[in-house]
Amino acid sequence: MPYRDQATVRAWVEEFSERETLTTDVTVLEKEFTAGPESGMVVVSLRTASTVTYIQPVMEEGLPHWVVTFEARPDSFDLDSAGVAALAHDLGTLARLLEFLQLKTDAILAAAR
């Protein structure tokens, strides 16, 4: 399916970045992991938190559903008000990107019916 294709997902991320200024680094990974319904990972680097954060489609009830994964951190971290505001902005952007990828995936699936 196209939502698992690196070139397609990269094009979607680029389309999103043309609509919204990205203040975080967003990378569509090469397929160095097992191809399947949970591939096409998008890694997002948050500005004020070094937590590994990525987006991927997972299958729920036979349909792909994009989710965000925040990997565990070994240590806690402190942020001042500016850092919290930057993190909140980054998370808002992440939520909008997630929604955009879901809408693109849903449109492809609807067109295939």
Image (cartoon, helix red, strand yellow):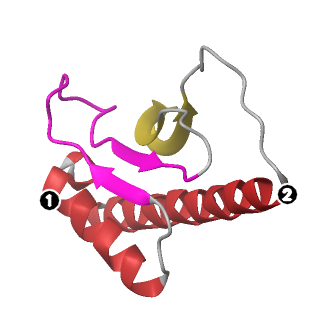
Name the mark on residue 81. 2
Is residue 81 rendered to the left or right of residue 2?
right
Q: Quadrant of residue 68?
A: top right
Q: Residue at x 38, y 44 (%)?
A: 43
Residue topped by disc 1: 7
Residue 62 in sight from this viewpoint: no
Residue 60 in sight from this viewpoint: yes
Q: Is residue 39 magenta?
A: yes
The main secondary structure of the magenta stretch is loop
Give the SS element for disc 1: helix
Q: Residue at x 52, y 56 (%)?
A: 98
Tell which of 78 and 88 is nearer to you: 78
Amino acid on which the number 1 mark rests in the picture: Ala
Q: Is residue 103 magenta?
A: no
Q: Residue at x 54, y 24 (%)?
A: 71
Can you give x and y, in whole percent of width and height, for residue 11 in the image?
23, 69
Amino acid on which the number 2 mark rests in the picture: Ser
Q: Which residues are magenta?
A: 25-47
Which sits earlier in the primary sequence, circle 2 or circle 1? 1
Can you give x and y, in whole percent of width and height, for residue 93 in the image?
59, 65
Position of the C terminus by quadrant? bottom left
- In this picture, is 28 found above or below 104? above
